[in-house]
Image (cartoon, rainbow, N blue to C red):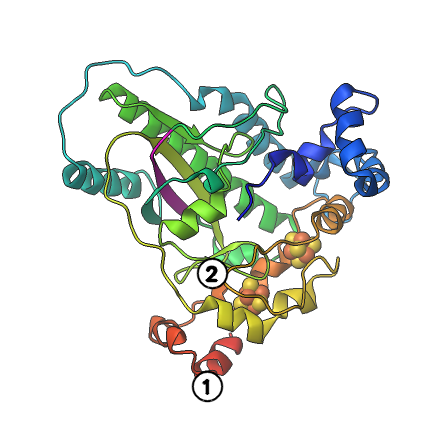
Amino acid sequence: MKQIDERDIMFSRMILKKGSKEYEEYYKKHPKRKKVDDNLRNKSNIFSNQKAEKYSKLSSPLVDAGFQYLADIKHLAEGKTTSEKVETNPKEITEQLKIFTKYLGADLFGITKLNNNHYYSYRGREGNYGKKIRKKHKYAIVFLTEMKEEMISKAPNIEMTMASVKGYVKAGTIGMWLAYYLRNIGYEARNHLDGNYLLVAPLVARDAGLGEIGRNALLLTKEFGPRVRIGIVTTNLELISDKKRDFGFLNLCNACKKCAKECTAESISFDNFSAKEKISIDQAKCYEKWSELGTDCGICLDVCPLSHNVPASLLNKLQQRNREVIGEILKY
Ligand code: SF4
Ligand code: SF4
């Protein structure tokens, strides 16, 4: 699969300043995106637009504050090792990292060996725009934080976005702590958090055995469906990797299509897809919906049957591609 360029994601396109060198270069390469992006860029910040349909005078600033906090700490993601290496072995440190990460508040944990396709090809955020990304670390420690069902079930209201930002803050903070810890015991480590990922987080989480990418382009997990936020710390410390797993979600998504039916922005494709295909949504239509609402919508998380406590016994049978099992899961 081709590497993804971070400059193509909506949040990167939205920071381009009209008339700047970066702006001119980007739209010379992608002329069809110019009109739509210019229109969206003229609208104000998603969460501070008081005219947006779901704006809440007390809750929306809380969401904004969470993202501001993440923006303020993101420069701490990298740092120098601060001491001599503490001797350990892959089995011992992998077990410790799993215990520590769960203790710090993560709900699921996995490790994968990194390849170039896990990394964005070029950076697309402020301060580093256009910088070529080179694979630096061998392993990714991946951890997921659950977004509570009772909050997601309020989508597309502000509760959905509060759950989302809480997940980003929690994952970003756990990652910061872990990265500092690894550097303190003498090993290079980098945190990847909202606004400062070098990696395509769902792909890394998938390859760490934590789930599969669904029709809504989100990581689907057996435990929480798409109701997760992803934190990642990369390192060169030797670790034991988990294996990518087949959960049977591809067959479920090809039968279900609920997210595509319920997405009021028509961002999600109805086409059947195979395991080899890159799954994506129409980012511009999705972003426009977020702007109108003043929340990050989340209907595609709420309507997913996997978000709603499907019994593990049924999910375990999914890999058998049994139509009856799929039918049962679709009732959730
Ligand atoms: S977040 Fe909303 S608009 Fe975006 S893809 Fe999901 S359902 Fe559609
Ligand atoms: S709603 Fe259905 S099609 Fe969409 S991601 Fe969930 S299982 Fe897949």
Most foreground residue, 17 or 246: 246
Q: How many numbered marks appear?
A: 2
Report helix, strand or loop for mark 2: loop
Label 2, label 1: how many angstroms apart (C-alpha)? Answer: 20 Å
Report helix, strand or loop for mark 1: helix
Residue 180 colored magenta? no
> Does residue 222 sit above or below 23 in this rendering?
below
Q: Earlier in the sequence, mark 2 or mark 1?
A: 2
Give the number of the mark in front: 2 or 1.
1
Residue 156 visible? The answer is: no
Q: Residues within 10 Å of mark 1 (few under 14, many from 20)?
A: few
Q: Give the number of the disc on residue 144.
A: none
Q: Residue at x 51, y 58 (%)?
A: 150
Q: Give the left or right position of residue 35, taking residue 319 as reference.
A: right
Q: Residue at x 51, y 41 (%)?
A: 200
* Mark 2 residue type: Gly
Q: Which residue is mark 2?
A: 225
Most foreground residue, 59 or 80: 80
What is the quadrant of residue 254 in the picture?
bottom right
- If the picture is divided into quarters, which one holds ligand 1? bottom right
Q: Give the left or right position of residue 248, taking residue 8 as reference.
A: left
Q: Give the left or right position of residue 287, taking residue 70 as reference.
A: right
Residue 139 colored magenta? yes
Q: Give the number of the disc on residue 324.
A: 1
- Residue 145 lies, in percent from the top left, at 42, 47
Most foreground residue, 312 or 255: 255
- Residue 142 lies, in percent from the top left, at 37, 42
Q: Which residue range is magenta in the image?
A: 137-144
